[in-house]
Amino acid sequence: MVSLIAKRAGLGLLTLWLVSVLVFAGTEILPGDVAGAILGQSATPESLAALRSELGLDVPALQRYFDWLGGILTGDMGRSMASGQPVSDLLWPRFRNTMALAAYAGVIAVPLAVGLGILAAAKRGTIFDRAANIAALAFVSLPEYFLGLLLVLWLSVKTGWLPSLADTYEGMGLTAWFTATTLPMLVLVMVTMAQILRMTRTTVLGVMDQPYIETAFLKGLKNGRVVMRHAAPNAAAPIVNVVSFNIAYLITGVVLVEAVFNYNGLGRFMVDAVSKRDLPMVQAAAMIFGAAYVILNMIADIAAIALNPRLRHPRGKEA
Amino acid sequence: MSDILRIRDLRVATAEGVELLHGVSLDLEKGEILGLIGESGAGKSTIGLASMGYGRGGCRITGGTIELAGKDLASASRPEREAVRGARIAYVAQSAAAAFNPAHRLERQIIEGPLRHGLMTAPEARAWMIELFTALGLPEPETFGRRYPHQVSGGQLQRAMVAMAMSCKPDILVLDEPTTALDVTTQIEVLLLLRETIRKYGTSALYITHDLAVIAQVADRLMVLRHGAEVETGTTEQILSAPREEYTQRLVSERQASLNAEAGAHHRTGEEILRVDHVSAAYGRTPVLHDVDLSVKRGETVAIVGESGSGKSTLARLVSGLLAPSAGQVRFDGEALPESYRKRSPDLLRRIQLIYQLPDVALNPRQTVGETIGRPLETFRGLKGRAQRNEVARLLEMIGLPVEMAARLPGALSGGQKQRVCIARALAAEPDLMICDEVTSALDPLVAEDILRLLRKLQDELGMTYLFITHDLSVVRRLADRTVVMQKGRIVEEADTATLFEAPRDPYTRRLLDSVPQLDRGWLDKVLAARAS
């Protein structure tokens, strides 16, 4: 099992490296001159040449790639072209913001969604099951920004309970932070919960058709115990998978939610960087997004390996 | 009145309202073993589960009473049924491998019942479990429960399932084909221990099986079922020696015939058509065949017998080109056979056909019988349109199905009919060699007998060559000219079938032959006595 996990971790590192190649290639090597793209049509040949050497574009691409990769590995992501500040100084506060919101939403959404999903499976066909399904379907079908605007309308504009904008700043109090971020959190919870809930329900129901579930019922066990003790452990791997996928979404896919609530996170950072053609910033943000996906997927796969009793307890000699 | 279970006019229907049981009544006394026997669809399992107040896949009890310990389960509430299940009446399934939860250790699953029903404390339940493990002959009973289901063998798991059923000291066990999935040499061990355990603790049992010879060893009385209704009930001796109903007579005589048929067939044989020349094979790094040497002549039937893990199916995969040997060579009609089916010419593919164990899975459910048989006619023989339809009709007639069947989908056929269609599909290619991989194992005894008769008829008419792969010695006895016995990837004995059955040389062959249950009530006791002496 250890070798399997090591293999999977190695594969994750390889994928990360490939991501770095793609990010670099996508932003630097693809057709078109970066300097030209930055300066636009009014650029003079002199200013183009000056910018190229400033960006280091006269150095061969391969060498630039390794310089860049080495920089990332040592925490130096270069300087922003727009402001001249180190990218990491600009990036990390945003990254912290994004992670804080993702954690806030995740801590509520994941247990709630998995719990409700199992409950829906245990009460298959009841009013509760149907209501949970319809609600989940509705949340999944509505675009996040629309959900966000609906919440702003009800919880902020009409009732005044919560602020409509998620303004956060360094050194703000914890209570103030929670108040400010509750609305975007609610939107994220709704969107991610829907998928986790439906997936959990489907997986648990799939397990409920297995013969060992019938055995459990024939032992005279109650429905709840059968679902919790006999079905849920066997449904764990796919559930971990969908959970990790949704956490990755919480980190990387929240551009629209950040935009609606004017939240200072990574998504908006990326959009700003792209619109300003600030390449080092775009590369850094893309690397972080890519790494989040790769690492979370890797954790899910490793968890699936670790959860499999056949791999955890090999047959050994007695078989 | 010492009846512990009393069922009257029991009716069970599916969720769609199709009635599966049409009013069955039975009584079970304390300490008695009642055998429920019949073919698939007879309603045996349905009775077993209904007597626990349970319906599989949405089945409901629609009428009658099930009196267990003075309480009617048919009209009981859900909590009342749950209180009885596992505690007073417990279930042993056919496949313990599927019935144990792969995520938990055996011990946790076995003591769960007594703990949940509040019958014992955890140390008491564990002590009782260890006592059961000991009684059932499981290795290291103190620590056996620490293992996960996948860490023990099939025979051990089946015994652990019995321990799980006995964990609450129930009055009644429902044993649903408890030894059917096991190899014969394992079956006899489990059967012995099962019988001893039931006797030792005075448990009553409903023993469900399709195998008369097995049930003859354990049951006090037998109830013969067909199409969800009782055919007849009597003591085991009476049913076996003097069955009243025609259906029971057929069941008994078929089983008798399969055990007592004259061993061995003798076909006129021609030149060698298949030669497996010192072949070894492996799955990954695990070797499964060791230096296997085998020859098949045109027109003869060679049977390869062995238990699970003997490598017999691997041999079939080798010949059909699904697996490459790691050493040695397979020769067909004098020429080396390309290792992979991908490299074989269409004509070579045509000449070797394979018939599988499970006809349900081997047929495309969306193709009609006519299309299924027509496909090889077109690809191998270029027959289209009317010529193809005529040939399909001829083949259907040959395998004993009405021509109208050509328009049917497999879903509308019975298991035996599906296997006939598979045979017709193989015949359509006009093969020189047919590999039959456990072709009757999934079929009911009477249906299996029909299929064997058909295969024999085809051989007589067409001079077909069969390579027969099976674990069922009675099939071998009736069909094969020569028999090859395999164990752990090696050939341990090869002989003329009659010789092999009358004078087996290898100790393993002898053990295999001795393990086949006989239709004689005292057989198991004789085996026991023979061992003691």
Image (cartoon, coloured by chain):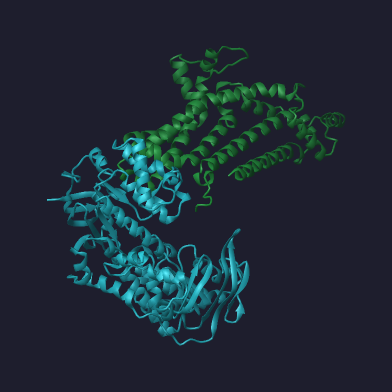
Chain colours: A green, B cyan
In the displayed structure image, the side of residue B270 where residue B94 appears, left or right: left
Tell which of B32 and A210 is nearer to you. Answer: B32
Q: Residue at x 74, y 32 (%)?
A: A73
Residue A27 x/y as whole percent: 73, 36
Frontmost residue, A270 versus B504 = B504
Instruction: For the C terminus of chain B, give its image quadrant.
Output: bottom left
Determine the residue positioned at 56% across, 23% down.
A101
Q: Residue at x 79, y 37 (%)?
A: A66
Compared across the picture, whether A311 is left or right of B167 comes to: right
Q: Residue furthest left?
A: B1
Q: Is residue A213 visible?
A: no
Q: Position of residue A260 (x, y in %)?
A: 55, 24
Residue located at (18% from left, 70% from top): B245
Is B292 situated above or below A238?
below
Is B75 or B180 nearer to us in this picture?
B180
Asked which quadrant contains residue B422, the reply is bottom left
Task: Looking at this view, name the residue that lies furthest to the front.
Answer: B533
Q: Quadrant of residue B155?
A: bottom left
Above or below for B389 versus B210: below
* Residue A143 coordinates in the image, percent (x, y): 50, 32
| Number of numbered discs | 0
Q: Residue furthest right?
A: A46
Q: Is residue A148 left or right of residue B23?
A: right
Work out whether residue A193 can be spotted. yes
Q: Position of residue B89 (x, y in %)?
A: 26, 47
State which quadrant residue A282 falls in: top right
